[in-house]
Image (spheres, rainbow, N blue to C red):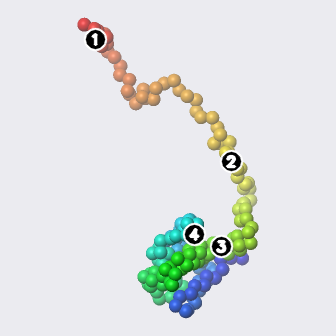
Amino acid sequence: MGGFDEIKLGWQGKTYAIPANSAMRAIALIEEHITMQELVQYAQRGTAPIGRLANAYASILRFAGCKVEDFEVYLGMFGNDGGQEAIAASVNGLLTMMIPSDLRKRMEQGLAPKKPVLLKGEKEPDLGNSRETAKATSKPTTRSRSGKAGAHQKTSGNSHLLNSTG
């Protein structure tokens, strides 16, 4: 079972496809322009940088075999609604391409992601602070740190001059 489905894209009435086994390359192309974390943040805020979205979509369309320039995708993102609907659809479309199909299906069903698969001999990490981070700090010293750097000056036999009053 593969982690991704075939990616289908539409542009100017034509449908373009990226095979499932090329999905990782498509994701890398998207991430040259915008990351998944940024897309999630844009989806939550309801706003996104249109230029970066257009660049990402144009790179994917070209990867799928479409002859298109970035500026054409940018101009195409402005529909009758001033682009708001197209921007939201672009963010959602890019996210859909980037999330593995089995995880996306589980999320659509309202199920939590599966726990990570552990290799033989691995154990699930403890939650919270581990013992290593809870160890006591090293023993405090009574020496001054500046002493190591040579800040203390040795006094010679003339130290009585420093204390003389007159």
In this rendering, which labeled residue sits more in front, label 4 or label 2? 4
Q: Residues within 10 Å of mark 1 (few under 14, many from 20)?
A: few
- Say what amino acid the circle numbered 2 marks: Gly
State the residue position of label 4. Answer: 43
Closer to the chain start, of discs 3 and 1, is 3
Q: Residue at horizontal 73%, vertical 62%?
A: 115
Label 3: state its secondary structure.
Answer: loop
In this rendering, which labeled residue sits more in front, label 3 or label 1? 3
Label 4: state its secondary structure.
Answer: helix
158 vs 138, left or right, is left
Q: Could you tell me residue 8's position as x and y percent?
A: 60, 84
State the residue position of label 3. Answer: 100
In this rendering, which labeled residue sits more in front, label 1 or label 2? 2
- Say what amino acid the circle numbered 3 marks: Pro
Q: Could you tell me residue 160's position as x and y percent?
A: 31, 10
State the residue position of label 2. Answer: 128
Task: Determine the image quadrant of residue 137.
Answer: top right
Numbered marks: total = 4
14 vs 2, left or right, is left
32 vs 19, left or right, is left
In this rendering, which labeled residue sits more in front, label 3 or label 4? 4
Per the model, the C-alpha gap separating discs 2 and 3 is 28 Å
Q: Where is the C terminus found, in terms of image quarters?
A: top left
- Say what amino acid the circle numbered 1 marks: Leu
93 vs 102, left or right, is left
Closer to the chain start, of discs 4 and 2, is 4
Per the model, the C-alpha gap separating discs 3 and 4 is 18 Å
Q: Could you tell me residue 44's position as x and y percent?
A: 58, 66
Camera-side residue of 106 and 124: 106
State the residue position of label 1. Answer: 161
- Say what amino acid the circle numbered 4 marks: Ala
